[in-house]
Image (spheres, rainbow, N blue to C red):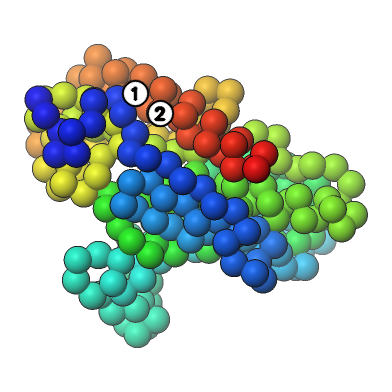
Amino acid sequence: MSRPSDRSPDELRPVSIIRHYTRHAEGSVLISLGDTRVLCTASIDERVPPFLRHRKKGWVTAEYGMLPRSTTTRTDREAERGRRSGRSLEIQRLIGRSLRAAVDASVLGERTITVDCDVIQADGGTRTTAITGAWVALRDAVNWLLYHDLIADDPVHRAVCAVSVGVFEGQVVTDLDYAEDNRAETDMNVVMDDRGGLIEVQGTAERNPFDRDTLNRMLDHAGKACETLFASQRDALEN
């Protein structure tokens, strides 16, 4: 089996994480995974949603969108349609859940960190790439709070990243690009922490059902890929 990109089955596309990519946000990252590029900006707001008022804890949430020409043809902005698509809502909820798994909200105080994930170029794996970049933007926003003595302790207790895996032409593969995702027999998104814990697993058999052995092999591929992504996050933060 030969992948369209000529990568080995367990090989990620090249990863790039550029911090402080925009001027005004407390945390901002441009993350690239191959030809998929996502701008993640973390903003701090000194208030919480109504359901958290007076509970002495904060909130971490996310929004996700694709720019009109991030794909091969132009799509209308969702604001022009008057509502977000079901896909965008589902993905931004996934990103929010993934980030909240990394944070002790009681340490944040009554403030909200919102991470906006804007896809500027899509070639598969946009939601998983967004999660990996969003965590670095979140980390920088929390560092900003610590630097300005707005919180006493660090609420971020683990790193989080995500990767797509799947079955393509009968072979378990890592990090599906669009050419593979469009033809995959199985597609799975895996969110993990840096202790090896699973935060969320979204797997779908597009054609034939997959068995338990295939599931385990996909999770093994995801675990190996996440080790590389965590190293990329650490390198970006150290530099």
Q: Residue at x 30, y 57 (%)?
A: 122
Looking at the image, residue 149 sits to the left or right of residue 75; the answer is right
Which residue appears farthest toward the top when viewing the image? 213
Q: Quadrant of the N terminus?
A: top left
Residue 228, x across and y down, in percent:
46, 29
Task: Name the spot of residue 75 as percent of width and height, x first.
Answer: 25, 75
Residue 169 visible within the image: yes
Mark 1 → mark 2, Cα distance in angstroms: 6 Å
What residue is disc 2 on? 225
**Measuring 33% from the left and 61% from the top, which residue is drawn there?**
121
Q: Mark 1 points at which residue?
A: 221
Q: What element carries label 1?
A: helix
Q: Is residue 14 above or below residue 24?
A: above
- Crowding near pointer 1: few (<14 within 10 Å), some, many (20+)? many
Between residue 1 and residue 115, name the one nearer to us.
Answer: 1
Does residue 115 appear in this view? no
User: Would you place residue 172 above or below residue 145 in this image?
Assistant: above
Q: Quadrant of the C terminus?
A: top right
Residue in the image at 31% along x and 52% along y? 35
Q: Relative to residue 90, is residue 44 drawn left or right?
A: right
Residue visible at 28% across and 72% down in the picture: 69
Numbered disc total: 2
Foreground: 21 or 128? 21
Callout 2, which amino acid? Ala
Q: Position of residue 21 (x, y in %)?
A: 57, 61
Picture coordinates of residue 115, whole percent (x, y): 57, 59
Kind of residue indicated by mark 1: His
135 to the left or right of 127:
right
Q: Is 133 located above or below residue 214 in the figure?
A: below
Cβ–Cβ under 8 Å for marks 1 and 2? yes
